[in-house]
C-alpha cells in the first residue's frame, strides 16, 4: 500500500482529570510509555511517509527523550486540541501527502488492523471515522428532568480519524476561531460527507487511573500470546572474488560467495527462519533461482518480503539467534555491524539479536574452506 499518508499523534493534552502534574501519555503500561506504545503502532504499520507528534511546550523535552530512538517530527501544540491539530497540519504541509490520520496518544490499544483498514478506506473517501454503537440505555438528567435518549441516534467517536489532507486543513483554517473537540465535526461543518467504519471497544481513551489499570490488564495480561519458532539454514560455496556479503555488510576477503542472487548466506538463512516461523514455505518457493528476475538481486529484497508476510499475519519478532559456520574469513570484528544492519532491516532491537561464529574443526567442506554456512533461529509472537 502507498505511503502517501501522514500521521498526526496528539500528545499535548495535560489531562488534569488524570493527574495534576504528569499527563497520562507519560505514564507506563508494561514498562513502555503510553505515548511510545501509540507511536510504535503507527511506525510498525509502515504506512506513513511521516509521523508528527504534537506536544505541549511544557513537556517537549520529555517528549523528545521518550521518542529519541524514533524518526518522528515533534511539534509544539496550542492551548486547545483544535489549535494543536492545526499546528500539526501546518507542519505537515511540507510532506505533501494525500491523506492524514489524526490520533490521540491516549488511545494506545489501537490495533494495527484498524490502522490498515482506515488507511485503505481513506484512499477513496474524504473522511473515515471509527464509530461504536451504544448498548447501554441513555438518559438526560438535568434540573429534575429525567428523559430517555434514543441510543440508535448516538455514536461513540474514536480516533484515528482519516481525512484528505487539503480538505481537513482548509476546514480547520476556516473554523480556527471556533473550539471543537473533534476533527470530523469540523469537516462536517464544511459540508464534507463523513464515512464511518466500525470502531473497536478496546481502542478506548485513557482518561482516568481506572482506565490505565484496565489498559494494563488488556495490554499485558489478558491476551493469549501465540509464540512460534522458525529455523533457517543456508550454504554457499566460494569462488574467485575480493569480498563477500554477510547480513547486508560487505566483508573484504580474497574470495566471494557463489549464488544466483548476491549469495548473502546470512540473510538467506534469516529469511527462511522467518518464513518457517509463520508457515509460509521457504525462500526458493518465493524467489526461485530458475527465475532470471532474481539474478544478482540484493538479498534484502527476500528478507523484507518475509518481514512483510510476517507483519501481515500480525506476528512480531521476539529474538534472533544466528550462527555463522566457516574457517575463514574471521568475522568476530563484524558482529556489531551485522546486528546493527539486521536491526535496521527488521526493526528489532540489537539486544534481541545474537550473532555467533564457529568452525567445523577443519572437518568437511566447511573445514576445507570451500564455503560458508549459516544457521538462523527466530521466535515470533502475536496476541490472540
Image (spheres, rainbow, N blue to C red):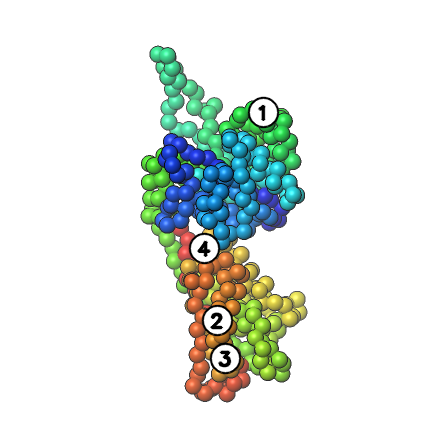
Query: Label for residue 82?
Result: none
* Chain-order first, disc 1 or disc 4: 1
Q: Is residue 236 left or right of residue 361?
A: right
Provide residue 352's location: percent of width, then percent of height. 42, 62
Q: Is residue 99 left or right of residue 22?
A: right
Provide residue 110's location: percent of width, then percent of height. 45, 42
* Chain-order first, disc 1 or disc 3: 1
Nearer to us of marks 1 and 4 is: 1
Provide residue 367's location: percent of width, then percent of height. 48, 86
Nearer to us of marks 2 and 1 is: 1
Q: Secondary structure at mark 1?
A: loop
Give the residue number, with chain letter if any, for mark 2. 335
Q: Is residue 94 above or below residue 236?
A: above
Residues tagged 2 and 4 counted as in contact (Cβ below 8 A): no
Outermost residue on the top side: it is 144
Give the residue number, with chain letter if any, for mark 4. 315
Q: Secondary structure at mark 2?
A: helix
Residues tagged 2 and 3 counted as in contact (Cβ below 8 A): no
Q: Is residue 224 above or below residue 142?
A: below
Give the residue number, with chain letter if any, for mark 3. 330
Q: Secondary structure at mark 4?
A: loop
Specify whether residue 125 is in view.
Answer: no
Q: Which residue is at a point 45% across and 45% down the rendered structure image?
A: 62
Q: Secondary structure at mark 3?
A: loop
Distance from Cα at disc 2 to Cα at disc 4: 26 Å
Nearer to us of marks 2 and 4 is: 2
Give the residue number, with chain letter if any, for mark 1. 177
Q: Is residue 202 above or below residue 3?
A: above
Amino acid at each position: 500500500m502507498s505511503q502517501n499518508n501522514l500521521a498526526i499523534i496528539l500528545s499535548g493534552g495535560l489531562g488534569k482529570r488524570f493527574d495534576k502534574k504528569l499527563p497520562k501519555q507519560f505514564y507506563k503500561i508494561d514498562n513502555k510509555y503510553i505515548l511510545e506504545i501509540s507511536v510504535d503502532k503507527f511506525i510498525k504499520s509502515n504506512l506513513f511517509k511521516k509521523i508528527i507528534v504534537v506536544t505541549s511546550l511544557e513537556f517537549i523535552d520529555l517528549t523528545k527523550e521518550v521518542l529519541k530512538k524514533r524518526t518522528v517530527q515533534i511539534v509544539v501544540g496550542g492551548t486547545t486540541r483544535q489549535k494543536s491539530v492545526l499546528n500539526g497540519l501546518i507542519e505537515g504541509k511540507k510532506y505533501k501527502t494525500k491523506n492524514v490520520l489524526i490520533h490521540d496518544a491516549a488511545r494506545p490499544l489501537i490495533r494495527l488492523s484498524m490502522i490498515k483498514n482506515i488507511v485503505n478506506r481513506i484512499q477513496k473517501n474524504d473522511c473515515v471515522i471509527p464509530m461504536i454503537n451504544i448498548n447501554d440505555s441513555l438518559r438526560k438528567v438535568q434540573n429534575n428532568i429525567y428523559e430517555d435518549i434514543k441510543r440508535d441516534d448516538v455514536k461513540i467517536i474514536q480516533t484515528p480519524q482519516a481525512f484528505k489532507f487539503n480538505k481537513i486543513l482548509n476546514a480547520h483554517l476556516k473554523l480556527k476561531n471556533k473550539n471543537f473537540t473533534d476533527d470530523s465535526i469540523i469537516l462536517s461543518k464544511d459540508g464534507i460527507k463523513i464515512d464511518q467504519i466500525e470502531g473497536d471497544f478496546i481502542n478506548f481513551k485513557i482518561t482516568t487511573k481506572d482506565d490505565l489499570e484496565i489498559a494494563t490488564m488488556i495490554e499485558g495480561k489478558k491476551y493469549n500470546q501465540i509464540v512460534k519458532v522458525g529455523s533457517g539454514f543456508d550454504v554457499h560455496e566460494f569462488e574467485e572474488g575480493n569480498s563477500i556479503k554477510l547480513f547486508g555488510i560487505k566483508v573484504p576477503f580474497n574470495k566471494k560467495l557463489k549464488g544466483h542472487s548476491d549469495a548473502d548466506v546470512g540473510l538467506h538463512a534469516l529469511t527462511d527462519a522467518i518464513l518457517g516461523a509463520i508457515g509460509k514455505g521457504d525462500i526458493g518457493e518465493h524467489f526461485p533461482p530458475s527465475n532470471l528476475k532474481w539474478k544478482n538481486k540484493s538479498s534484502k529484497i527476500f528478507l523484507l518480503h518475509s518481514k512483510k508476510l510476517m507483519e501481515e499475519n500480525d506476528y512480531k519478532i521476539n529474538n534472533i539467534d544466528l550462527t555463522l559456520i566457516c574457517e575463514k574469513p574471521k568475522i568476530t570484528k563484524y558482529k556489531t555491524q551485522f546486528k546493527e544492519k539486521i536491526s535496521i532491516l527488521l526493526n528489532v532491537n540489537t539486544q534481541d539479536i545474537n550473532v555467533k561464529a564457529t568452525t567445523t574443526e577443519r572437518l568437511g567442506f566447511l573445514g576445507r574452506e570451500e564455503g560458508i554456512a549459516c544457521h538462523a533461529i527466530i521466535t515470533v509472537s502475536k496476541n490472540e
